[in-house]
């Protein structure tokens, strides 16, 4: 009888030890979230843009910046991101100014640029999942429109044909920009994103000096909300 009691105590102790170890293993297996190799999400917000070289200063053109993003984990705090975006850029001014020859008065000026954009960035993450990165953005011009209200300063001068002038000097189809920005982790999968972009090569060239400098560049600030699934 004593042997049976000792055996029963041994079995119960063995079951308790095995059960404890099994529970601990289960917790490690099912409740500890391993870092994912890939993370995808959506981004949406606004571009505040100007075109450097058009003789107008200020980020007065506001456009859409929206699309999708995917992150690839390289190390614990380093990730590579790729985005596919629809991005509106350009310039706007209601400030009157004369051409350099003083023959015409420009009372309104607008550039509307619509791009398909693919930014590629390398980002460093902190322990709160906020991150800061830099990289390059490659853009393909989908369509554009450039308009101006031009008035002759003398009745002897012919009216200025704005559409003909801008057809003669179209915008380039491609743009490559340096991009730098940060993402502040808010809650859950939500982030607040701010970034700056600038063209590495001119997007518009060979312009009349009366209207603009010979080379023009996209200059963009962006504010967006990002959600990672």
Image (spheres, rainbow, N blue to C red):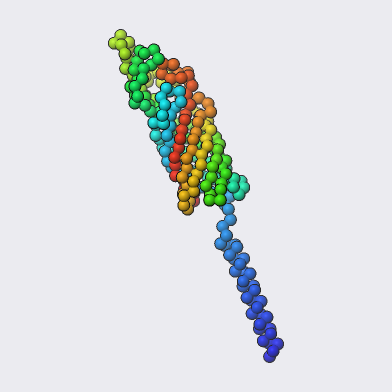
Q: Quadrant of residue 167?
A: top left
Q: 14 above or below 194?
A: below
Report x, y in % for residue 219.
Answer: 47, 30
Extreme residue in the bottom direction: 1
Q: Quadrant of the N terminus?
A: bottom right
Q: Is residue 162 left or right of residue 6?
A: left
Compare residues 184 and 214 and report the one nearer the observer: 184
Q: Quadrant of residue 62?
A: top left
Report x, y in % for residue 165.
Answer: 40, 18
Q: 39 above or below 154?
A: below
Report x, y in % for residue 194.
Answer: 47, 40
Q: 181 above or below 14?
A: above
> Visible in this render: residue 72?
no
**Which residue lies at the image location 67% right of the left edge and 86% below the top edge?**
5
Extreme residue in the top direction: 156
Q: Is residue 58 left or right of residue 2?
A: left
**Which residue lies at the image location 30% right of the left edge and 11% below the top edge?**
154
How many discs mark residues in the rendered view? 0
**Which residue lies at the image location 50% right of the left edge and 31% below the top edge?**
198
**Which residue lies at the image location 43% right of the left edge and 20% below the top edge?**
212
> Visible in this render: residue 45?
yes
């Amino acid at each position: 009888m004593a042997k049976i009691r000792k055996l029963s105590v041994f079995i119960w102790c063995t079951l308790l030890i095995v059960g404890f170890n099994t529970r601990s293993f289960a917790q490690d297996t099912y409740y500890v979230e391993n870092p994912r190799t890939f993370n995808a999400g959506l981004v949406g917000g606004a571009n505040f843009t100007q075109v450097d070289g058009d003789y107008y200063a200020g980020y007065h053109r506001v456009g859409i910046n929206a699309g999708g993003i995917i992150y690839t984990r390289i190390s614990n705090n380093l990730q590579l991101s790729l985005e596919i975006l629809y991005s509106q850029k350009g310039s706007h001014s209601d400030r009157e100014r004369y051409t350099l020859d003083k023959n015409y008065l420009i009372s309104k000026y607008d550039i509307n640029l619509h791009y398909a954009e693919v930014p590629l960035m390398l980002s460093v993450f902190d322990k709160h999942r906020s991150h800061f990165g830099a990289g390059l953005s490659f853009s393909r011009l989908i369509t554009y429109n450039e308009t101006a209200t031009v008035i002759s300063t003398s009745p002897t001068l012919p009216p200025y044909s704005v559409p003909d002038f801008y057809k003669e000097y179209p915008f380039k189809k491609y743009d490559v920009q340096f991009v730098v920005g940060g993402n502040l982790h808010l809650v859950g999968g939500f982030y607040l994103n701010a970034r700056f972009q600038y063209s590495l090569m001119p997007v518009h060239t060979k312009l009349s000096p009366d209207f603009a400098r010979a080379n023009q560049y996209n200059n963009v600030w962006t504010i967006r909300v990002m959600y990672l699934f």
